[in-house]
Amino acid sequence: MKVLLVGSGGREHALAWKLAQSPLLGKLWATPGNPGIAQHAECVALNLSDHQAVIGFCRENGVDLVVIGPEQPLVEGLADALEAAGVKAFGPSAQAAQLEGSKGFTKDLCKQAGIPTAAYARFDNANAAIDYVYGQPMPIVIKADGLAAGKGVVIAVTPEDAADAVTMMFDGGFGAAGAEVVVEEFMQGEEASLFAITDGTTVLPLGSAQDHKRVGDGDTGPNTGGMGAYSPARVLTPALEAQAIREIIQPTVEAMAARGTPSRGILYAGLMLTEDGPKLIEYNVRFGDPECQVLMMRLESDLLALIDAACTGRLAEVEPKWRDETALTVVMAAEGYPGTPVKGTVIHGVEHAQAQGTQVFHAGTSRSAAGDLVASGGRVLNITALGENVAEAQARAYRGVDAIEWPYGFCRRDIGWREVAREQGRG
């Protein structure tokens, strides 16, 4: 099977690494790719906004399947264009991608389908939103409606903070994503992520993970796209996972199918584990980043076979298999992230890190004119390891981190801290 992988981050490196292991794979291309992905795929430069250019490449090269990693091309309808041209695409249509592309769309769907989630209100102007927040209990959550690279959320502890967040979003703080806002009640509990693959009818669980969004140790500082993750998230017990599939993910798939816009691909449910059971925080319609990295480390099954089954309506015939070990990944980010990261700094020691028993996934890297590996983004490397438990996986991952020679990089030193505390009887 000839496959084109779309994307350039750590998620796509993990997907390329796993796809390359498939006996079904004949040829793998990636666009635009990165130096890590280039170890497994031929990287090609395509304008992803020019759907005809992508279709043309697929036709010229006999591509059988396009795997779309990031959310932006999905929201922009790349999967629709490929399918209309007769090219199989793994990822939802633009209509189904609204589950991620519009938080308001998803909240309305939850309300209509009786899916448990936080109480909310939607606004398309700042004054009405500000009037609303002054009448609500604190803290309260302000979200940009559209795509904001995982950063479009503010938890406000006072009405004044909430009003400032509303003003910031409507003033363009998150670009077009803040043209509308969703104001939600603050839910108490612990967060976990649940992944599923669906062909529009059948839902197969794909494991759980726990992400670390704050930039600093102890969950301090501003939100980021994710500073690390581990899988499985044992706080999401088998019983809670089954409840979330039954009450949240399956009804979502059924509701989307009833609308005539079936959701095919990945459904990544961010969950709050409340006293009343799991509630949906929000959906993504693709693998998370860096959650994908830990899921791919644990997946024993052939990823390409699973994806092909989802694209051809055969998910009911397959069952993914998983390693018993825990996987943990630590994000090494460039100085300045999540603000303006310092780019172009040279990175050494990746091979040394992998010799420590880790898998290093490239997220924001490129090659300099001299051939050096350099930082080209905010989140740059994902140092990932397996272990018998979170503590062991954590120790191995940080041995890998310490082998990286990059003075301009930093990371959190406490990824997996909640589960380590539970393992040690302190949580």
Image (cartoon, rainbow, N blue to C red):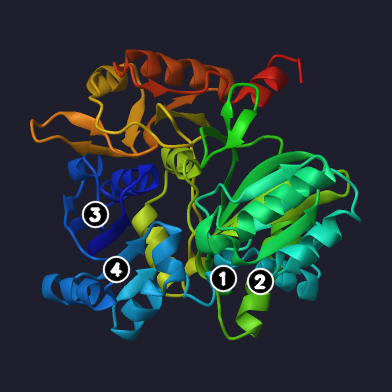
Q: Residue at x 34, y 31 (%)?
A: 342
Look at discs 4 and 1 and give the one toward the viewer: 1
Where does residue 347 sit, x and y in percent of width and height?
A: 25, 24
Q: Amino acid at mark 3?
A: Pro
Earlier along the polypeptide chain: callout 4 or callout 1? 4
Where does residue 307 sit, x and y in percent of width and height?
A: 40, 62
* Spatial separation of the CA atoms under disc 4 and disc 1: 23 Å
* Spatial separation of the CA atoms under disc 2 and disc 4: 29 Å
Q: Amino acid at mark 1?
A: Gln
**To which residue does mark 1 refer?**
98
* Spatial separation of the CA atoms under disc 1 and disc 2: 7 Å
Is residue 180 shown left or right of residue 358?
right
**To which residue does mark 4 refer?**
65
> Pointer 2: residues within 10 angstroms few (<14), some, or many (20+)?
some
User: Foreground residue, 339 or 90?
Assistant: 339
**To which residue does mark 2 refer?**
105
Q: Residue at x 33, y 74 (%)?
A: 88
Q: In the rendering, which numbered label is found on residue 32?
A: 3
Look at the picture and state if 78 lies above or below 307.
Answer: below
